[in-house]
Amino acid sequence: MLSLKPILAKQFAKLIYRKNQKWIDHPVETQQKVFHDLIQAAQHTAFGKDHDFANIRSHSDFVKQVPVRDYEALKSYVERVVSGEENILWSGKPLYFAKTSGTTSGAKYIPITKESMPSHVEAARNAILFYIHETGKSKFVNGKMIFLQGSPIMKEKNGIQIGRLSGIVAHYVPKYLQKNRLPSWETNCIEDWEAKVDAIVEETLPEDMTVISGIPSWVQMYFERLQQKTGKKVGDLFQNFNLFIFGGVNYEPYRAKFENLIGRKVDSIELYPASEGFFAFQDRQHEKGMLLQLDSGIFYEFIKAEEFFDASPERLTLKDVELHVNYVMIVSTNAGLWAYNIGDTVQFTSLRPYRVIVSGRIKHFISAFGEHVIGKEVEQAMEEAVKNTDIRISEFTVAPQINPKEGLPYHEWFIEFENEPEDYTEFARHIDASLQNQNAYYYDLIQGKVLQPLKISKVAKDGFQDYMKSVGKLGGQNKIPRLANDRKIADALEHKIENT
C-alpha cells in the first residue's frame, strides 16, 4: 500500500523552505528587528531597568549599557529567577531551566521561556525539512527514528520545571512523529547511560530504523553494542537507515569509524543546538557550514577571538563579520540572556547566506607557549592524517606537555584507535605537518626549536568512556574536550596509556 506520508512531507518541506527564505534573503534587517523587539519586550524587567533599556535605540547604545557576561557574571540575576521572582531577565517566569554542568560555575540553570521554546523544536524540524526539499528523499518518514537524548524526567522548583535540554525537547516531539519515535518513554527515563544503551539496543533491533540522531560519541557506543550483540554491520541490521543527524561535536573525526560500523556511507545533517538557543543547522548537503538562525528571537554579536581578552574588544553585528575569522559568539535572547558569552567560537563559511562552523571553545585551546591552537585546527589535522588510510579513531584529546622527562616541550595527543596506524611516527608527522600548515604560531615554535613535534599516547580501548564514567559524565550531552591548556584530563588518562 502506498503511504501518503512521504508525499505530504515533500509538500510540507517546500512550504517551510519558502517561508524561511523571507528572513534568509534579508539577514541584516531581520537581525535589526529581532534586536529592537527584544529590547522593547524586556525594558520593564529588572535587568531592563538596571541597564536603561528604555533609552536604548541602537546597537552602540546597547554596547554602552550592557557588558558582555558569562554565566558567572549573570548568576545574581539567574538566582533571583530560580528563587521564584518574576520579571527579572524576561517577562514573567521561564517555563523551564535547562540544567547543565558548568566547568567553573557548578550546575548552571539556563532559562527557557514560552517565547524561546518553539525555536528549539522548529529548528530541528526545519533541518529535516530542508534536507527533504534539497534531496527529494522522504521515504525515511515511514520508518522508525531514534533520538539518543537525556532523560525527560523533570523536577520542579518554585513553579519552574528543571531538566536537561534534550529531555525537555522530548516533551515537544510533534504528534505526527510520535508513532515513529524511539526509544520508548520508559527506556528514555533510564538514568544509567550504559543500561539505557543496552535497553535501546533491545528496542531497536526488531525495528525498521531509518533515522538515527545524537552526539557522535554516544551514537558510536550504541552502534558498537549493536555490533557486539549481533556480529553484523549496522547498515545490514537497518537496511533503510540512510540519515544520521548529529550535533555537539564535529563529525569528521568519527566519520571513518562510523562508515565502518555502518558498512556504507549515509547522509548526515549537522545541528547546532545549545541550552541557550538553537543557533544553526546544516541546510545544504554539499555546502560547508550551518545556516545561522536569524529569526528565532536571538540577536548575535561577534568578537574576534584574538581580541576577546582585551580591555574593550569591538563587538560586531552580522553586517560586519568576515569569512574564516575566529569569533566568540555573543547572544541576547527571548529567554532573557543579554550579551551572553556561550563560550563557543565560530567561523563564517558563507555570507550569502550566513553559515557558520563551530571552531572550538574560547576556554578550550592550547597556548602554553603562545601557539593559540584551537579545536578546529586539531580536528582538521586529524582528518587530514586519516584521509585515504585504514586508520580509524574512536576518540582523542590534546594537552601540552610542558615539563617532559627529556627534550623540548611538546603537544601530547591522547588517541583511542579503532584501527591503529602501522607507523606511529609517520602518522604523528602527518598530523604535525597539518597543524604547522594551519597555525603560523605553532609553525614558528617548531621551526624555532621551542617545541618538538607532537607525540602520540595510545589510549586503551574504552579508556575515554571509563574516564567519562569516572567523572560522572558518561552519556547525555557530555563530550570530551578536543584540547585543553592544562593536563587535568591528560593526567587522568595516564594510567590508560598502552605502548605503541
Image (spheres, grey):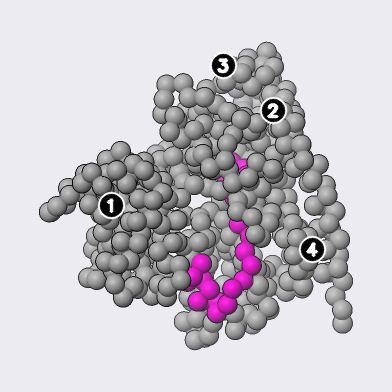
Whole-angstrom CA distance, mark 2 to mark 1, is 43 Å
Establish if 343 lies above or below 474: above
* Residue at x-position 45% and y-position 67%: 387
Q: Nearer the viewer, residue 482 or 100?
A: 482
Q: Position of residue 178 (x, y in %)?
A: 74, 65
Q: Is residue 462 magenta?
A: no
Residue matched to label 2: 35
Residue 336 visible, this angle: no
Q: Name which residue type carries label 1.
A: His
Indicate the quadrant where residue 21 lies. top right
* Residue at x-position 35% and y-position 73%: 420
Q: Position of residue 330 (x, y in %)?
A: 55, 34
Q: Name which residue type carries label 3.
A: Lys
Q: Which sits earlier in the primary sequence, circle 4 or circle 2?
A: 2
Q: At numbered mark 1, what does the secondary structure look like: helix, strand or loop? A: strand
Q: Which sits earlier in the primary sequence, circle 3 or circle 1?
A: 3
Q: Position of residue 103 (x, y in %)?
A: 40, 43
Magenta segment range? 255-280
Whole-angstrom CA distance, mark 2 to mark 3, is 15 Å
Q: Residues within 10 Å of mark 3 (few under 14, many from 20)?
A: few
Q: Name which residue type carries label 2.
A: Phe
* Residue at x-position 34% and y-position 73%: 421
Q: Which mark is residue 176?
A: 4
Q: Is residue 270 magenta?
A: yes
Q: Nearer the viewer, residue 37 or 84?
A: 37
Residue matched to label 3: 64
Whole-angstrom CA distance, mark 4 to mark 3, is 47 Å
Residue matched to label 1: 411
Whole-angstrom CA distance, mark 1 to mark 4, is 50 Å
Do the CB atoms of the residues marked 4 and 2 lie less than 8 Å apart?
Answer: no
Identity of the residue furthest to the left in this view: 406
Do the CB atoms of the residues marked 4 and 3 lie less than 8 Å apart?
Answer: no
